[in-house]
Amino acid sequence: MRFRRAFTLTELLVVIAIIGVLVALLLPAVQQAREAARKVKCQNNLKQLGLALHNYESILGTLPPGAIVSPDGMFVYSNGLVMIFPYLEQGAVASLYDPNLAWFQHPPNVAKQVIPLLICPSNTKQNPFSYPGLAPFGVTSGELYGATDYIFCKGSSDSWCLPVLPGEYRGAFYANRSTRMAEITDGTSHTFLIGEGAGGYHWPLCHGPGCTKPFSGANGRVFANNGWIIGGSGISFLADAGIIQAGIWGCTVEPPNKWPVTDNFIDLPSFPVCDPSYRGKGLYSTSGFRSDHNGGVFFLHGDSSIHFVTQNIDLALYRRLSTIGEGADVQLP
């Protein structure tokens, strides 16, 4: 009788152990390769946004305003993302948006439109995301909102005064204010236009300037998801009801990747004040820039170049790069 040679139990366990070690060694490399591909896609998205902004500027002579806002600051009718949709091959969505209506007066089928170009693949979240509790305040746009991971740079102040921030604080985008390229006096290569504003469960919101404790509303924690349609900021009566928000704006008062994310908030008693909160004036706040890339955030500069800014960047330098007239002599990160 001939016996067939087979693996012993010990040999089988050794083989399984070797395979396990190889998988453990290879998995980080695979994950790194995937993240590298996601980073490239994210940079390409920013590049497309830069081309759209430059096409808009070449035709109309200015960059789009960050938003069109009523004089009292209570109604936001349109925002810069919506204005460049025709230059992003998003004419179909742009045709659904009525600039004569405030963002929250649009129907749900507009608000929940998902635009893949506005999402960085490194960031994971529900899209459209849920933003509940707004109906009692006259919001007709529903509870689902298409997200954006890319937000406009409003400069180095978190205040929300109108008509415009003073020049030393002002970024390329602000409410009711268009910026000409000639106004970027320190050079477009030294000026942020758009940065990443990641959302999802990794990024809870907190409330108010310098906040450090995640905010909990009626439905638990609130996360820094940004609706591309939402051009405004939070306000007292919404915060009192447990509703705060991030939005399409970012500033450089706080360093990149600050956790939890400060909300965008207009403090009406402080409304005439234009100084940033770190000067002890006003209770405004504005979200910072953040990403799910390891160690920093991608920014689109005014010359359409893309740069990765580390979260350990010198804060004074970071703030200067965010304004249109304070970064002429800085070295790019």
Image (cartoon, rainbow, N blue to C red):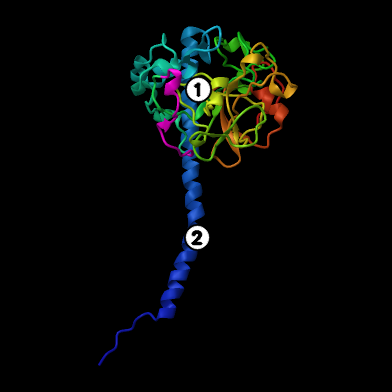
Three-letter amino acid code at disc 2?
Ala
Disc 1, SS: helix
Q: Farthest residue in the right direction?
A: 279
Q: Residue at x 46, y 65 (%)?
A: 20
The x and y percentages for residue 317 are 70, 27
- Specify start and end residues of the magenta stretch as a single range: 122-139
Q: Nearer the viewer, residue 293 or 37?
A: 293
Magenta residue check for 131: yes
Q: Quadrant of residue 310?
A: top right
Quick one: quadrant of the N terminus?
A: bottom left
Give 184 or 172, whichever is nearer the viewer: 172
**Closest to the observer, 27 or 133:** 133
Q: Is residue 150 above or below residue 171?
A: below
Question: How far apart are the two marked residues, 1 and 2, measured between alpha carbons?
Answer: 40 Å
Q: Residue at x 50, y 22 (%)?
A: 50
Query: Looking at the rendered structure, which numbered label has been put on residue 50?
Result: 1
Is residue 323 positioned above or below 117 on the image? above
Relative side of 149 to 141, left or right: right
Residue corresponding to mark 2: 24
**Observer-nearest residue: 275 or 124?**
275
| Residue 250 rendering spot, x and y as whole percentages | 58, 25
